[in-house]
Image: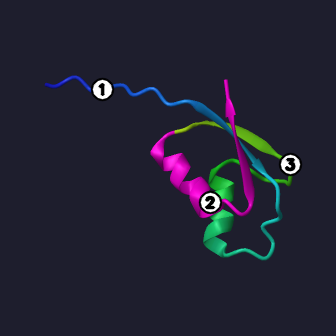
Amino acid sequence: MAAKKKTEYGKIKVTLVKSTIATLPQHKKIVAALGLKKIRSFKIHEANPCILGMIDKVKYLVSVEEVK
């Protein structure tokens, strides 16, 4: 069996900056899947392709910062 490669991803802080009231239902689910509930709530995630794709869908609702 081939050994799996472990890739190193950085950490990012995702903050909800706008309300999800007038957004598409799918975007509300994405925000909930990111772990964000209220405005100015934040969550620290690994910057993997899955999370980055979710953030790209709702980039008008969130702000993203790198965590060192």
Q: Which of disc 2 and disc 3 is earlier in sequence?
A: 2
Residue placed under numbered mark 2 in the picture? 30
What coloring was used for the rendering?
rainbow
Q: Does the magenta run of residues contain 59?
A: yes
For the point 66% across and 74% down, the residue is 25
Real-space CA distance between mark 1 and mark 2, rounded to the nearest whole angstrom: 28 Å
Judging depth in this view, the residue of 26 and 59 nearest the camera is: 59
Q: Amino acid at mark 3?
A: Arg
- Quarter of the picture holding the N terminus: top left
For the point 81% across and 72% down, the residue is 21
Q: Where does the magenta region start and end?
A: 48-68
Mark in the foreground, 3 or 2: 3
Q: Is residue 42 above or below residue 24?
A: above
Packing grade of label 3 (10 A; few <14, some 14-19, many >=20) is some
Q: Amino acid at mark 1?
A: Lys
In the figure, residue 59 lies in which quadrant? bottom right
Measured as percent of width and height from the top left, residue 49 is found at 46, 46
Measured as percent of width and height from the top left, residue 22 is found at 78, 76
Query: In what element is the residue under mark 2?
Result: helix
